[in-house]
């Protein structure tokens, strides 16, 4: 029997977790797994009270490291579709069943939530101007470089088929934020079909967000990932990121 699982990489999400869960339509998923990356608040206790499957890291592994645990658990629990949803209320859980249906009906293999429908909407939703400009610039570069036409490449709402997670060597990716960019480039490299679904923009004080320095580092690491892919494609440098899984 096919199973749809939502995974939540969590860090200090006590104030937004319940509201995030309330937006996921009832009975639309078979299980919700929360992986806590050493939160200092009551995220774990609240998640358990809400009936989630909870796994707690003994030490902080970073955003990418947290996702690795999420995907390992989802595969172990026989998921055929996995949706990654941040528990900070930045993304609307009402689109989760839509993403699941699109993947199950073979329209795409990888889906991203697209927050950038118009400049006005993005800025009205609270997205900082510098993040909007960086998002638009990086997404344009990635689309041209990878031959894609995604509305946004930097969303924290993502959904994958089981075959994607069984094919990509995501265990070799960074434990930091660039994990997401590496995953996209790997998806293109291994021939999967990418698409997106519109979601509203929600920037608020409770939502997790990296600062300017971390954002700049992330942007440079994303460009280096693209360069690594090109070097790998032209056989000038072999990268384990684009080698088949063991």
Image (cartoon, grey):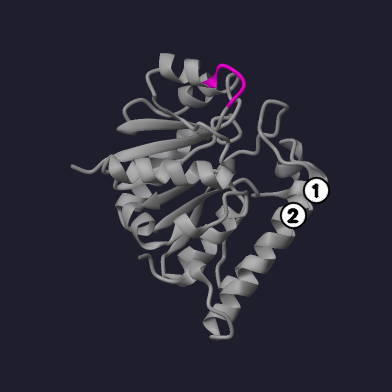
Q: Is the residue under label 2 in contact with that under label 1 (CB below 8 Å)?
A: yes
Magenta span of residues: 39-43
Q: Which residue is mark 1?
A: 213
**92 is higher (above) or lower (below) than 148:** above
Q: Is residue 207 left or right of residue 10?
A: right
Q: Which type of secondary structure does the marked residue at label 1 adopt?
A: helix
Q: Quadrant of the N terminus?
A: top left
Task: Looking at the picture, tell me which residue is in the foreground, 201 or 87.
Answer: 87
Circle 1: is it few (<14), some (14-19), or many (20+) Cα within 10 Å?
Answer: few
Q: Can you give x and y, in whole percent of width and height, for residue 19 in the image?
A: 53, 21
- How packed mark 2 is, by other alpha carbons closer than 10 Å (few <14, some 14-19, many 20 or more), is few
Where's the C terminus, which quadrant?
Answer: bottom left
Identify the residue at horizontal 34%, vertical 46% (top origin). Answer: 81
Quarter of the rendering containing residue 144? bottom right
Placement of 159 over or under 137, stated as above or below: above
Distance from Cα at disc 1 to Cα at disc 2: 6 Å
Residue occupying the far front of the picture: 58
Q: Is residue 20 visible?
A: yes
Q: Is residue 41 magenta?
A: yes
Tell me residue 114's x, y (percent).
58, 49
Q: Which mark is residue 121?
A: none
Tell me, for residue 217, which label it has, or none: 2
Instruction: Please give the name of the residue rendered at 37% of the width and 50% of the height, measured from the top-left corner.
Output: 102
Image coordinates of residue 104 in percent, x first then y, are 30, 50
Q: Residue at x 41, y 62 (%)?
A: 168
Q: Is residue 123 left or right of residue 76?
A: right
Where residue 74 sits in the image (x, y, percent)? Answer: 35, 42
Q: Is residue 144 visible?
A: no
Where residue 70 sits, quadrant-wise, is top left
């Amino acid at each position: 029997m096919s199973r749809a699982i939502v995974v939540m990489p969590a860090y200090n999400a006590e104030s937004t977790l319940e509201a995030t869960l309330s937006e996921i339509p009832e009975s639309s998923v078979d299980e919700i797994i929360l992986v806590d990356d050493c939160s200092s608040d009551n995220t774990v206790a609240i998640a358990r009270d809400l009936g989630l499957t909870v796994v707690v890291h003994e030490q902080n592994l970073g955003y990418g490291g947290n996702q690795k645990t999420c995907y390992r658990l989802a595969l172990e629990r026989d998921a055929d579709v996995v949706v990654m949803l941040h528990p900070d209320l930045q993304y609307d859980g009402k689109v989760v069943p839509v993403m699941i249906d699109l993947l199950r009906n073979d329209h795409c293999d990888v889906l991203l939530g697209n927050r950038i429908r118009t400049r006005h909407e993005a800025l009205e939703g609270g997205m900082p101007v510098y993040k909007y400009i960086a998002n638009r610039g990086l997404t344009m570069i990635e689309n041209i470089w990878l031959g894609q036409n995604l509305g946004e490449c930097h969303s924290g709402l993502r959904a994958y088929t089981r075959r994607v997670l069984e094919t990509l060597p995501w265990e070799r990716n960074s434990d930091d934020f660039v994990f997401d960019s590496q995953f996209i480039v790997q998806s293109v490299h291994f021939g999967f079909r990418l698409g997106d679904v519109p979601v509203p923009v929600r920037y608020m004080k409770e939502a997790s967000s990296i600062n300017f320095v971390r954002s700049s580092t992330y942007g440079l690491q994303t460009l280096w990932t693209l360069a690594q892919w090109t070097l790998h494609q032209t056989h000038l440098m072999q990268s384990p990121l684009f080698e088949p899984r063991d």
